[in-house]
Image: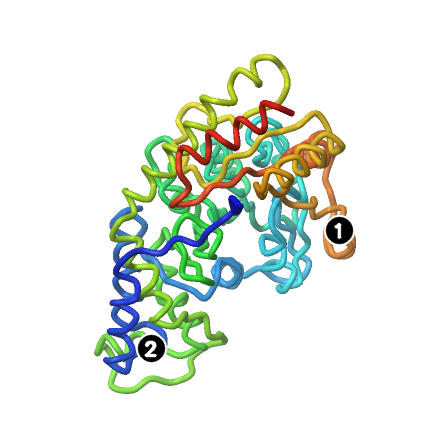
């Protein structure tokens, strides 16, 4: 059986976890959390990184730091995971869904400005499959209208747009380290902060509304409750598991890119013959091989293709049900404009196995099965 996903695990993971236990430091903001934060800051160039319990919580933190209030509107694609919307619905805001581009499955930057109203407070671009949205255009719109930009870069670590790391272009960026991601801590995420003025407030909210972070740095002699907040700190054991992968991040990235390129090379003849569609990576975007997907003609063909792969012991999955068609999406949000591509393209897309440890020979076998369809 070729699994759809196998969580990454580096050789040093258990060594570092054992060290946490032996040092009796397994709660949040320990040595390995700090190591992960520093690694991300150095590799991305962000002003500050704060590891969190999930990308969902990183996005919630960003919503709090952006002062999102009840009745505010937040523009985002409907083709995304529920957390993108949940973080703002929890603040009483209204997700305003905009159609996607069929080539990248990202929000169509040309449709964003027409969705802006006097209640709009933020734009949330989602970098699907680790391929960047058209961030220059999005940042220009945000600047014209005084809007916050929160990048949902859950799939975007080690990817970039015109030389800038994803997650560092907007006011805030959110990474995921879920077990399905390129680098994993089981459950986990990170908030990237562009502007230094937001750092102290982020630390306070993340630490249950206290100034405990300043206390640990020796800047104050005692800490106290100073603002609202919650607990967004992952266990240092989780961070230790992640850090072992970050140490070999380039090796993992190169291996995934080799798999992605093999898929593309093998399946290109089918795409050129019009039998299926392959991913698009626009000029100026450097992707991270987070996933490899193909598009069938329609939902019926996709269902048949997934079944055929399963018969050959290959697990393939489809992705999101567009949020604006879901019960909660109908209740809490609204779709702006025409759903020309979101639903139609989502019904064609299927993801193929992709993980660190998958072999080129297994990719060849998968492609052979696809070509027999």
Report whether 223 appears left or right of 368: left
Between the residue at mark 1 and the residue at mark 2, the CA separation in whole angstroms equals 39 Å
**Up-down: is 282 above or below 10?**
above
Which residue does the image show at 56% across and 45% down from the upper left?
Answer: 123
Q: Earlier in the sequence, mark 1 or mark 2?
A: 2
How packed mark 2 is, by other alpha carbons closer than 10 Å (few <14, some 14-19, many 20 or more), is many
Which residue does the image show at 23% across and 75% down from the upper left?
Answer: 217
Q: Is residue 247 visible?
A: yes
How packed mark 1 is, by other alpha carbons closer than 10 Å (few <14, some 14-19, many 20 or more), is few
Q: Position of residue 193 (x, y in %)?
A: 38, 55
Q: Position of residue 110 (x, y in %)?
A: 60, 29
Q: Residue furthest left?
A: 218
Report whether 331 appears left or right of 114: right
**Which numbered marker is on residue 26?**
2
**Up-down: is 266 above or below 92?**
above
Corner quadrant of residue 240: bottom left
SS for dot 1: loop
Q: Position of residue 214 (x, y in %)?
A: 29, 75
Q: According to the image, label 1 marks what residue? A: 326
Q: Residue furthest top?
A: 273
Which residue does the image show at 52% across and 32% down from the upper left?
Answer: 366
Report whether 152 appears left or right of 184: right
Q: Nearer the viewer, residue 58 or 255?
A: 255
What colour scheme governs how the chains and residues are painted in the rendered image of this protein? rainbow
User: In the image, which is nearer the foreground, mark 1 or mark 2?
Assistant: 2
**Up-down: is 361 above or below 53?**
above
Q: Nearer the viewer, residue 254 or 203?
A: 254
Q: Position of residue 373 (x, y in %)?
A: 65, 25
Corner quadrant of residue 7: bottom left
SS for dot 2: loop
């Amino acid at each position: 059986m070729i699994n759809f996903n196998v969580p990454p695990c580096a050789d040093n993971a258990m060594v570092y976890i054992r060290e946490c236990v032996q040092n009796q430091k397994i709660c949040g903001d320990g040595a390995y959390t700090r190591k992960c934060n520093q690694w991300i800051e150095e590799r991305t160039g962000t002003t500050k990184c704060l590891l969190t319990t999930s990308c969902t919580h990183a996005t919630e933190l960003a919503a709090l730091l952006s002062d999102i209030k009840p009745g505010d509107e937040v523009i985002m694609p409907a083709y995304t995971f529920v957390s993108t919307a949940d973080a703002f619905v929890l603040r009483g805001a209204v997700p305003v869904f905009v159609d996607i581009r069929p080539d990248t499955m990202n929000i169509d930057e040309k449709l964003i400005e027409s969705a802006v109203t006097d209640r709009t407070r933020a734009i949330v671009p989602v970098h699907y499959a680790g391929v960047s949205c058209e961030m220059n255009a999005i940042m220009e719109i945000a600047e014209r209208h005084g809007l916050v930009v929160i990048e949902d870069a859950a799939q975007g670590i080690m990817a970039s747009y015109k030389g800038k790391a994803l997650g560092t272009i907007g006011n805030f960026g959110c990474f995921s380290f879920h077990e399905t991601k390129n680098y994993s801590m089981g459950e986990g995420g990170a908030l990237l902060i562009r502007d230094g003025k937001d750092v102290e407030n982020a630390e306070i909210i993340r630490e249950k509304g206290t100034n405990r972070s300043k206390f640990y740095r020796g800047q104050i002699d005692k800490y106290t409750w100073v603002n609202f907040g919650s607990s967004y700190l992952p266990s240092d054991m989780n961070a230790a598991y992640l850090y072992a992968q970050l140490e070999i991040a380039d090796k993992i990235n190169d291996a995934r890119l080799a798999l992605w390129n093999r898929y593309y090379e093998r399946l290109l003849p089918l795409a050129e013959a019009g039998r299926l569609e392959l991913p698009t990576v626009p000029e100026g975007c450097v992707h991270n091989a987070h996933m490899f997907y193909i598009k069938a003609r329609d939902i019926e063909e996709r269902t048949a293709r997934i079944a055929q792969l399963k018969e050959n012991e290959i697990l393939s999955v489809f992705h999101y049900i567009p949020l604006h068609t879901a019960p909660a999406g109908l209740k809490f949000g609204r779709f702006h404009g025409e759903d020309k591509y979101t639903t139609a393209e989502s019904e064609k897309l299927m993801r193929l196995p992709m993980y660190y440890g998958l072999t080129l020979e297994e990719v060849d076998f998968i492609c052979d099965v696809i070509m027999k369809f």
